[in-house]
Amino acid sequence: MEKKTIVITGGNSERGIGLGVGRRFAREGWRVLIMDLAKEPGEGCSQAVQDSGGAYYSVDVTNKKQVDAAMKDIFARYDFVDALFSNAGILQWVPFVDVTEEQFDREIGVNLKSMYLVGQPIARKMMERRKGSIILAGSMGGKESAPFQSVYAASKGGVIQLTKTMAQELGPYGIRVNCTCPGIINTDIGKGAPNPKIPWLDRTPLNRFGTPEDVAGVVWFLANEDSAYMTGQAINVTGGMMTF
Ligand code: NDP
């Protein structure tokens, strides 16, 4: 059987969700292609890519020229991409009245525009083959919000709406589009959170924060045929936090 290929953006962070997903897909025998900012991949990312027979691309996912160059190379070398996990994201904790234009553009750029820049060429190729699964990184923050996350919440709300519209347009071509909406996952993105007063754990029935592997299980399900009749969904991975 032909080896399947997944593109993951933002997969270089050692403790991050993207690398957790990359490791899972590498273990399952997929080819893992990772795009991230760093010039060279870190040790974990390098290992996952190598184990899977994949490759690392140093790409700023907000930069169309860089994304297009990477996609050109990917389609020349690997022909097809079976799944995309568009995961690169940032979280800036800033009171709304202090958000600068530069901060606003950057957060919307990484969290939302990148989904369009990377998703469009992959969707076009998937349309030709009439198959494929696109998974966007949403967030609980796209459904609820918290102080100092105005731009993050707006970007992730946008991701959820993008998911639904892409699913409607691409469904007739056999392409499914869903997004993951994690709660609190133990990675570096939450560093600098200014508001310890929010009792996140008390609101989490499973009584622990999530791990990248928790999200990886859901991405694995969404990329595969077990979820063949699911599209346009924003799936909570929150330990139950959304339930009250
Ligand atoms: P991390 O910060 O661990 O990983 C994010 C990765 O994205 C980093 O490797 C980062 O690179 C990369 N990145 C940032 N900007 C760019 C860019 N312009 N181009 C390419 N890569 C970039 O975060 P998480 O693993 O926690 O988050 C992954 C996704 O999951 C994000 O979209 C986030 O919003 C979402 N999420 C996370 C939650 C959590 O609690 N952790 C909860 C809900 C959603 P670098 O390190 O060099 O900046």
Image: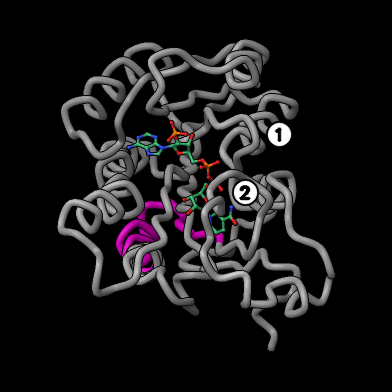
User: Is there CB contact under 8 Å for labels 1 and 2?
Assistant: yes
Q: Amino acid at mark 2?
A: Val
Q: Tell me the residue that label 1 is attached to.
A: 24
Q: For numbered disc 2, what is the local secondary structure?
A: helix
Residue 22: % across, % down? 62, 31
Residue 219 is tagged as 2
Q: Judge from the rendering whether residue 121 lies leftward or rightward of residue 3; answer left or right.
A: left
Residue 162: % across, % down? 33, 63
- Asked if residue 180 shows in the view, the reply is yes
Q: Judge from the rendering whether residue 244 lies leftward or rightward of residue 149; answer left or right.
A: right
Camera-nearest residue between 9 and 170? 9
What residue is at 68 percent from the left and 67 percent from the top? 238
Q: Amino acid at mark 1?
A: Arg
Q: Earlier in the sequence, mark 1 or mark 2?
A: 1
Q: Magenta region: which residues?
A: 162-180
What residue is at 18 percent from the left and 34 percent from the top? 64
